[in-house]
Image (cartoon, rainbow, N blue to C red):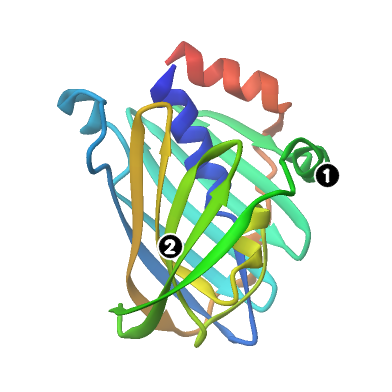
């Protein structure tokens, strides 16, 4: 299902972690320009996401609609995805080593001369070319450092992605940072709650397809 595929990619691509910055949060707006998805289905897709960061830890919260929400927790190289589907709480640890092996290393990052200001930060434009996927366009800032992430391509960009656009199976998605708020963040936000059940990636994808 196209909707299920895009939602799963959205959850994964949100896994970035900050370095050098102490703590705070970033709010993102999510839009679906030029998407083939019917308007009534688009209304159920996420409209915003909030990331909390502290050192090498980050937490990205995304409301999926229809009683679903996701949280991506990153602590250094460890990543856990939490899903709450109508009270069914699941946790998944993606196999990043396997993902790296399946992803072609032949991607190319093209840096362009175009500039922009997003959420008050100066940004530069880059395009990620890959033989196995459509091009990803992003705007990054060098004033916020990124330590690691789930996407090897995004990790290779020399700055933090403030806006990026991608297309998957006819569905387009754009995430844009609308605010960056430095401040204290509680350590409890980066802990996996005890009431979440650990599941495999395949089991979680089956749950998506049932919706």
Q: What is the quadrant of the C terminus in the image?
A: top left
89 or 43: nearer the eye? 43
Q: Is residue 135 above or below residue 177?
A: above
Instruction: Give coordinates of residue 185: x percent, y percent.
Output: 54, 76
Residue at 54% over, 38% down: 133
Estimate how packed mark 2 is, as few (under 14), some (14 to 19) or many (20 or more) residues with alpha carbons within 10 Å.
Answer: many
Q: Is residue 171 above or below residue 135?
A: above
163 or 194: nearer the eye? 163
Q: Is mark 1 on a helix, strand or loop?
A: helix
Q: How far apart are marks 1 and 2 (CA)?
A: 24 Å
Q: How many labels does the image show?
A: 2
Estimate how packed mark 1 is, as few (under 14), some (14 to 19) or many (20 or more) residues with alpha carbons within 10 Å.
Answer: few
Residue at 55% over, 18% down: 207
Question: In which image quadrant can residue 131 be found?
Answer: top right
Q: What is the quadrant of the N terminus in the image?
A: top left
- Residue 131 got which mark? none
Q: Is residue 188 visible?
A: no
- Residue 138 got which mark? 2
Question: In which image quadrant can residue 162 be found?
Answer: bottom left
Instruction: Give coordinates of residue 40: x percent, y percent.
Output: 17, 24
- Residue 97 got which mark? 1
Residue situated furthest top in the rendering: 210
Q: Can residue 51 be seen in this view?
A: yes
Residue at 56% over, 72% down: 53
Q: In this view, does 130 lie to the left or right of 77?
A: left
Residue situated furthest left in the rendering: 39
Residue at 59% over, 55% down: 15
Instruction: Give coordinates of residue 146: x percent, y percent.
Output: 61, 74
Q: Is mark 2 on a helix, strand or loop?
A: strand
Q: Which of marks 1 and 2 is nearer the N terminus?
A: 1
Q: In this view, does 171 lie to the left or right of 141?
A: left
157 or 175: nearer the eye? 157
């Amino acid at each position: 299902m196209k909707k299920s595929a895009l939602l799963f990619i959205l959850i994964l691509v949100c896994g970035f972690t900050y370095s050098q910055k102490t703590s705070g949060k970033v709010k993102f707006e999510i839009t679906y320009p030029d998407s083939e998805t019917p308007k009534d289905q688009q209304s159920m897709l996420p409209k915003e996401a909030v990331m909390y960061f502290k050192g090498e830890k980050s937490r990205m919260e995304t409301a999926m609609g229809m009683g679903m929400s996701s949280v991506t927790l990153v602590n250094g190289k460890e990543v856990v995805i939490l899903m709450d589907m109508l009270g069914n709480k699941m946790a998944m640890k993606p196999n990043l080593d396997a993902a790296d092996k399946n992803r072609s290393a032949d991607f190319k990052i093209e840096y362009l001369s175009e500039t922009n200001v997003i959420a008050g930060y100066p940004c530069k434009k880059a395009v990620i070319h890959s033989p196995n996927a459509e091009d990803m366009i992003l705007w990054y800032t060098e004033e916020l450092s990124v330590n690691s992430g789930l996407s090897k391509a995004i990790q290779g960009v020399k700055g933090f992605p403030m806006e990026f656009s991608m297309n998957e199976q006819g569905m387009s998605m754009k995430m844009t940072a609308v605010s960056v708020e430095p401040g204290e963040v509680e350590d409890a936000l980066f802990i996996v709650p005890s009431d979440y059940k650990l599941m495999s990636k395949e089991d979680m994808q089956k749950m998506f397809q049932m919706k």
